[in-house]
Amino acid sequence: KLGNIKFFPPTYLSDEIIFQQLAKGIYYRPNKLQDFNSTLLSNIAEVISTLSSLKRNEINVTNYIANMDLSKVKAEDPLNSKIIYNFIFFLKNFSSENIITTLTHGDFKFEHLFILDNKLEYVVDWENIGLRSILFDLLNFFVPWFVNRSYNYSHIKNYIHKFIKDYLPHLKDFIQDKYDIYFAIYGLERYLRLSSARSSE
């Protein structure tokens, strides 16, 4: 059913072989914050807006964490185990809160976003698609970029709030007073996704 999403590359099945139309566009990864132009940000918002409107569901934080299989991730090394424990410990303070889950790309980043004539053409590499928290793709897109450039938690938080206000205002109510909850859940979800990826590096 991804074929109903206009930025999913046209896909065909023939004799049990899957074909996808090649992209003509390019991916662009800015090196500096000032290189984020409004067209690029609108293209990012279009993907997040579309996916976050699909398969939407409300679930209790405690129940959501209970359904996560973090056992394999915890066993990998002490540092990551401690980080996961801290996320879970933090979320216990919000056991009565609910979050929204939706369809997510799962590996949404600059390398998978193709732009043609300043407009969104395709998003590629959909093998990690799944149901996750509504802000997963948004955080997964921006957080690694900021972390790799030594931005701290508050800088990232302020940027995400501003991005939602400017480009995804319909999501503002979901993140209102819940950013820290969604960030901790994103952290757990990202560990899970990386543990099932081709390389955990």
Image (tube, rainbow, N blue to C red):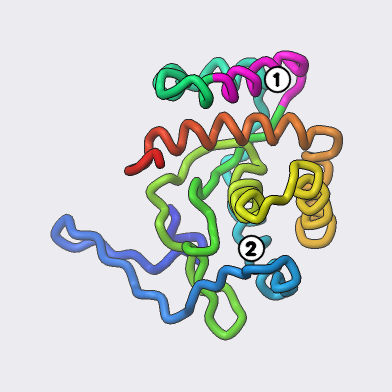
Secondary structure mostly seen in magenta is: helix
Amino acid marked by disc 2: Ile
State the extent of the magenta-drawn residues as a range: 82-98
Please tell me whether mark 1 or mark 2 is closer to you in this view.
Answer: 1
- Residue drawn 76% across and 56% down? 168
Residue 27 screen position, x and y as percent: 51, 72
Amino acid marked by disc 1: Leu
* Residue 52 visible from this viewpoint: no
Point out which mark residue 33 bears: none
Q: Which residue is mark 1?
A: 91
How far, Cα to Cα, is label 1 from label 2? 28 Å
197 within the magenta span: no
SS of the residue under disc 2 = helix
Q: Is residue 142 above or below residue 201?
A: below
Q: Quadrant of residue 36?
A: bottom right
| Left or right: residue 69 compared with residue 120 | left
Q: Which residue is mark 2?
A: 44
- Residue drawn 77% across and 15% down? 93
- Residue drawn 69% across and 75% down? 39
Q: Is residue 88 above or below residue 34?
A: above
87 within the magenta span: yes
Whether tag 1 and tag 2 are in contact, CB under 8 A, the answer is no
Total marks placed = 2
Q: Is residue 98 above or below residue 102?
A: above
Residue 21 screen position, x and y as percent: 34, 73
Of the 4 image quadrants, the one containing the C terminus is: top left
| Left or right: residue 151 compared with residue 9 | right
